[in-house]
Amino acid sequence: MDLSEDFENPILYITSVLRLLCSFMFHNVANQEKVTFCNIRDTCSNPEAAKLLDKMKFAARSCKEIRDKNASVQSDGLYYLISSRGVLYQTYCDMTTAGGGWTLVASVHENNMYGKCTVGDRWSSQQGNDPNRPNGDGTWANTVTFGTAVAATSDDYKNPGYFDIRGRDVSVWHVPNNVQLQHWKTASFLRYHTENHFLTVHGGNLFNLFKFCIGGGGHFPEWSPRQCGDFTSFDWDGYGTNVGWSASKVITEAAVLLFYR
């Protein structure tokens, strides 16, 4: 089977590979190997492969595009998207809130509230409060990606949609750390979104709008290193004290999920 033409299109390529694997399923009949051929639309005795193909047939630039082109798609969950450069990736789509079509592009998760710009603080700096690196890791304004959608409440996450999708509004969810994906919506204690299309005048995404956000940056000369970290704005007067300039542990021990539409 020649896959050279399909390789130009990631979706066709992956579909071709699955078709090839499906065609070479073996079973033993009378001590002889026999090849079973099946159609790509069949489950091939593997329902997960069928689910994968079903999801991939809706691959688009954003969850909104999937929703707009397929009115029957009304389920929240993982979907495949493809960037303008042909990068195929999987992320979570909120297909039910305010008409649906919200694409998860990032999550900010604090892995160590006692650490100040330490390993894991990808949205600020992982190399300490360094005057030689005032921008820190520069995550809010670069095209570096990391993490996975399914683990977005357990670690930082950023996919190509963060800088590639051109949206109009932003949705934010606060979900307790380590909650499994299927429970995100019910477990979230704060969910809010804009409706004024403000992103249309700021390049269509946070990549073009923000340089630093929430924690941001890699050097804060005042009260160094107290201000350095992903969630420093949440714990100025102590971790989880909920007094003065500190939030409660409910806030600090939750991931912030960012969506575009």
Image (spheres, helix red, strand yellow):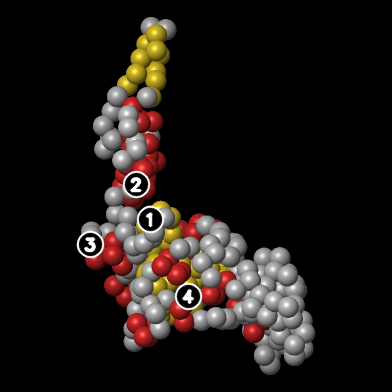
Tell me the kind of residue under disc 4: Phe
Q: Is residue 186 above or below residue 230?
A: above
Mark positioned earlier in the residue sequence (2 or 1): 2
Mark positioned earlier in the residue sequence (4 or 3): 3
Residue 167 in percent (x, y) is at 36, 75
Graded by Cα atoms within 10 Å as few (under 14), some (14 to 19) or many (20 or more), the crowding at tag 1 reads few
Q: Residue furthest right?
A: 224
Q: CA distance from mark 2 to mark 3?
A: 23 Å
Q: Nearer the viewer, mark 4 or mark 2?
A: 2
Mark positioned earlier in the residue sequence (4 or 1): 1
Tell me the kind of residue under disc 2: Glu
Q: Nearer the viewer, mark 2 or mark 3?
A: 2
Mark 2, secondary structure of its residue: helix
Q: Residue furthest bottom?
A: 244
Write down the residue under mark 3: 69
Residue 67 in percent (x, y) is at 27, 64
Tell me the kind of residue under disc 1: Gly
Residue 149 in percent (x, y) is at 49, 59
Graded by Cα atoms within 10 Å as few (under 14), some (14 to 19) or many (20 or more), the crowding at tag 3 reads few
Q: Which mark is residue 207?
A: 4
